[in-house]
Amino acid sequence: MVVDTKSIYTPTPPTDQHTGFESGRSDLTSGPEVRLDVRGDFPILAREFDGKALAYLDSGATSQKPVAVIEAMDRYYREHNANVHRGVYALAQEADAAYDGARTRVASFVGGEPKTTIFTKNVTEAINLVAYAWGRTNVGPGEAVLTTQMEHHANIVPWQQLCKERGAKLRYLEVDERGELSLEQLDRELERGDVKLVAFTHVSNVLGTIVPVAEMTARIRAAGATSLVDGAQAVPHMPVDAQAIGADFYAWTGHKALGPTGIGVLHGRAEILEQMEPFLTGGDMIASVSFESATWNELPYKFEAGTPPIAEAVGLGAAVNYLSALGMERVRAHEQELTGYMLRRLAEVPGLRVVGPPEPENRGGLASFTIEGMHAHDIAELAGRGGVCIRAGHHCAQPLMRCLGVSATARASVGVYNEPRDIDALVEALLEGRRVFGL
Ligand code: PLP
């Protein structure tokens, strides 16, 4: 039977007027020269709060969703819903085609293979999968896991638990005053000969630092250790080729990449995944089961126990199609321009200090900052009154906050739909906030 899978998960591409760069608006002389114009593809951005347009600057926490994603999931439930990998009827085959087709799209979006692209609940679960299914058999007493001071808790706590359980040591690469890691320190750590795994982020969710991941994985491989890269803040914002990066494991999360919540992705090296025991066990991940024992399904299904997030996979497939239609080089250029503009404008706010690398080309599309005399939560609350959504807190990176000598920062982060006016609204709200505080 031929299933028209295209109709299942091919999103409406961005409209002509929403695909290109546009020259800077004449009313914004200091704004970026070029940018994407796709705000109209995101229905939620039409909302107003107290008569003020929504300036959504919290894409680092989660992204907004384009119509293409919302409609793909709606269409899946209206027309194609059935459980996957078990039905022989036509509707079930459509669901299979939708789910497996989404996997193919998601894999190729980051240069991966469907067989080694595993769907999880989020990036946190993807990292836990490696910590349990690989870590419990490959890390032992006296050995070490190396991570960095700039990690999200999702890339710290699973290694703390693993090391505690296996009698291994957990060590951290330091973050310097520019918010960067040292390759020399990585080399020194690897020379100690006890490092089994190095787990590190591609882009810091607090500092914005873009980490030289390919250089790091090459050194780690040469030392005979295994690498895991947390790509949660990279995949949605820049071209990523997981093969070229050369990590043994590369993980990311769908909801930050214009996709739905409830789906994450783990790309693994085939020979390592083949050798690993499963993480979760039960239905769908088995080849056969007797009363005494079971054998495992082939990749990637060995790591997908139970009914998977089918509609979410369809939604993520639509999201990566949407991003591909925009072009990830253009997405990165747009967000880099906006980040440069944001850094320039934030410098106008007295007492404001941005953490992380100062150059927009060395950072992802976010800026974490403090303002002298104001707590981060007050900054975010006052920004919210101006319709500006920014984050405040430790950003699930409490150890890094200690290194920075602060308990919290405010964080503004951009996505494809942001425009200079969102940054202008932020700066206006921050200046007003200072006035409210009598600063
Ligand atoms: N890693 C990084 C760098 C993040 O920014 C985040 C989310 O903020 C995560 C991991 C966790 O993502 P999720 O909650 O989708 O698992």
Image: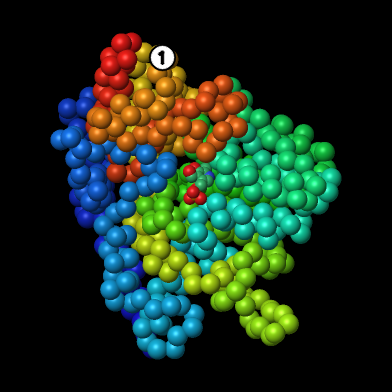
Residue at the image point whose x is 62% and y is 70% from the top: 281
Q: Position of residue 288 (x, y in %)?
A: 65, 83
Q: On the picture, is 414 further left or further right than 358?
A: left
> Badge 1: how crowded within 10 Å, few (<14), some, or many (20+)?
few
Q: On the picture, is 402 further left or further right than 95?
A: right
Residue lying farthest to the top in this orientation: 439
Vertical relation: 107 (above or below) 204: below
Residue 91 visible in the picture: yes
Mark 1, residue position: 373
Residue lying farthest to the front in this orientation: 291
Vertical relation: 60 (above or below) 424: below
Vertical relation: 136 (above or below) 295: above
Q: Indicate the secondary structure of the residue bearing disc 1.
A: loop
Decide which of 302, 234 is in the foreground and name it: 302
Residue at the image point whose x is 26% and y is 30% from the top: 385
Amino acid of disc 1: Gly
Q: On the picture, is 40 further left or further right than 275?
A: left
